[in-house]
Structures are given as structure tokens and as C-alpha cells.
Image (tube, rainbow, N blue to C red):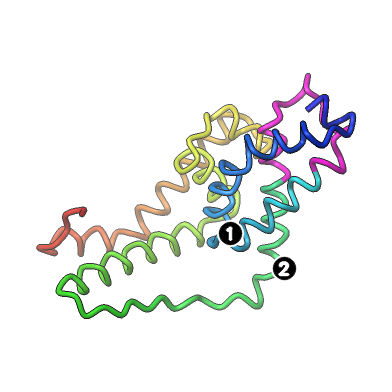
């Protein structure tokens, strides 16, 4: 990053190669689709390049700074699109014998995605960072700019809310004969 601060394009390319895939995974979970994730990731790396001198290595790790920038951009994008974003209808058309199972799995996945999307913003981000991206609690707390205790509280509330929201799904799944993972 010190080389990037000196406007070294090769160093920036190495930084991009090293961190883009992980950032995109995080952003897909935040935005809900790959196209938005790609756009936000590009914008985040443009910000890294244009604001490289504002990074302070003694205060925050680079990945924490990158994810914080990306999180803020994704939140801004979500706020702008909130009014125009209608729920996408997922259609599965398949004549194969296992179509019912695929439809059921798609329905369960969509319910989970919707339940996560309905979480309050900070709870959703905490959940995505820790459970889906595998970030440590201290690193996720730094991205959210909260204490580790506050992060753990956000995670606890998110899990409780998800359990309540998905209770019908869990009860239905217990009664379905076809609940094995394939």
C-alpha cells in the first residue's frame, strides 16, 4: 500500500489481484447480485487509488479500510435503489423428475436471502462479515466501527431475528420427507 501511495500502478494491480475476489464475495452478500457487487468493488478500488494517502497503516489494517469503504458504498447504493428495487421473481422451469426438489430448495434459499435482507443494516453487515466472509470479530468490529462487544450484540440480535423469521421454514422442513442436502 505504501507503493500505491506513491502512485505505483503495478503495486495497485497486485493489491487488486490479492483482494478483489474476497471483496466481491462480501459485496454479493451485501447487495444481493453480482452486477452490483462488481460495480461497488470497482468504485471501492477507485477510491483506494484516489484516496491512497488517507490510509494510515498504524491505525487500521488495509483490508479493514477496504471493506469499510466498500460497505459504505454498498449502503449508499442500496439507499438510492431502495425505492425502485422491486422483489425479483425467481422462476425455475425444469421437466426433470427432481424439479420439485429444485423449486423447494430455491424457495428456501430465497426465504433465507429475504430474511437476511430484512435485517437492520448493521445486523446484516455483521452477519455477512462474520458468518459468510469468515472475518474475525475484531476485524468485523473495525469495519463497522464498533466495539467487539457491540458486534457480538449485533450478531446475537441478527441470529434471533433470523430464527424467528425462518421458524415457518424450519417447521415445514421438519415435516417434509425430502429434506436431505444433495
Magenta stretch: dominant secondary structure:
helix
Among the two numbered marks 2 and 1 on one chain, the one whose residue lies closer to the N terminus: 1
**Residue picked out by circle 2:** 80
Q: Which residues are magenta?
A: 48-69
In-front residue for pair 137/179: 179
Quadrant showing the C terminus: bottom left
Query: Which x, y percent locates residue 52?
Result: 85, 35
For residue 66: magenta?
yes
Q: Quadrant of the N terminus?
A: top right
3 or 101, which is in the foreground? Answer: 3
User: Would residue 111 be found to the left or right of residue 100 on screen?
Assistant: right
Quadrant for residue 63, please give it: top right
Q: Is residue 67 above or below residue 137?
A: below
Q: Image point 28% across, 64% down: which residue? A: 105
Q: Identify which residue is drawn at 54% across, 41% down.
A: 129
Q: Which residue is mark 1?
A: 31
User: What separation in Å lies between label 2 and label 1 (alpha carbons)?
Assistant: 12 Å
Amino acid at each position: 500500500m505504501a507503493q500505491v501511495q506513491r502512485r505505483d500502478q503495478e503495486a495497485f494491480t497486485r493489491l487488486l489481484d490479492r483482494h478483489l475476489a474476497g471483496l466481491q464475495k462480501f459485496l454479493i452478500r451485501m447487495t444481493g447480485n453480482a452486477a452490483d457487487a462488481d460495480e461497488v468493488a470497482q468504485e471501492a478500488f477507485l477510491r483506494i487509488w484516489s484516496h491512497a494517502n488517507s490510509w494510515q497503516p498504524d491505525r487500521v489494517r488495509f483490508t479493514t479500510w477496504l471493506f469499510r469503504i466498500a460497505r459504505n458504498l454498498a449502503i449508499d447504493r442500496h439507499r438510492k435503489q431502495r425505492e425502485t428495487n422491486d422483489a425479483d421473481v425467481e422462476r425455475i422451469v425444469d421437466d426433470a423428475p427432481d424439479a420439485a426438489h429444485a423449486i423447494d430448495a430455491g424457495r428456501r434459499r430465497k426465504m433465507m436471502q429475504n430474511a437476511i435482507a430484512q435485517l437492520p443494516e448493521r445486523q446484516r453487515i455483521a452477519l455477512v462479515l462474520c458468518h459468510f466472509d469468515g472475518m474475525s470479530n475484531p476485524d468485523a468490529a473495525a469495519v463497522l466501527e464498533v466495539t467487539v462487544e457491540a458486534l457480538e450484540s449485533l450478531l446475537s440480535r441478527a441470529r434471533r431475528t433470523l430464527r424467528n423469521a425462518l421458524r415457518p421454514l424450519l417447521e415445514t422442513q421438519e415435516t417434509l420427507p425430502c429434506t436431505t442436502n444433495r
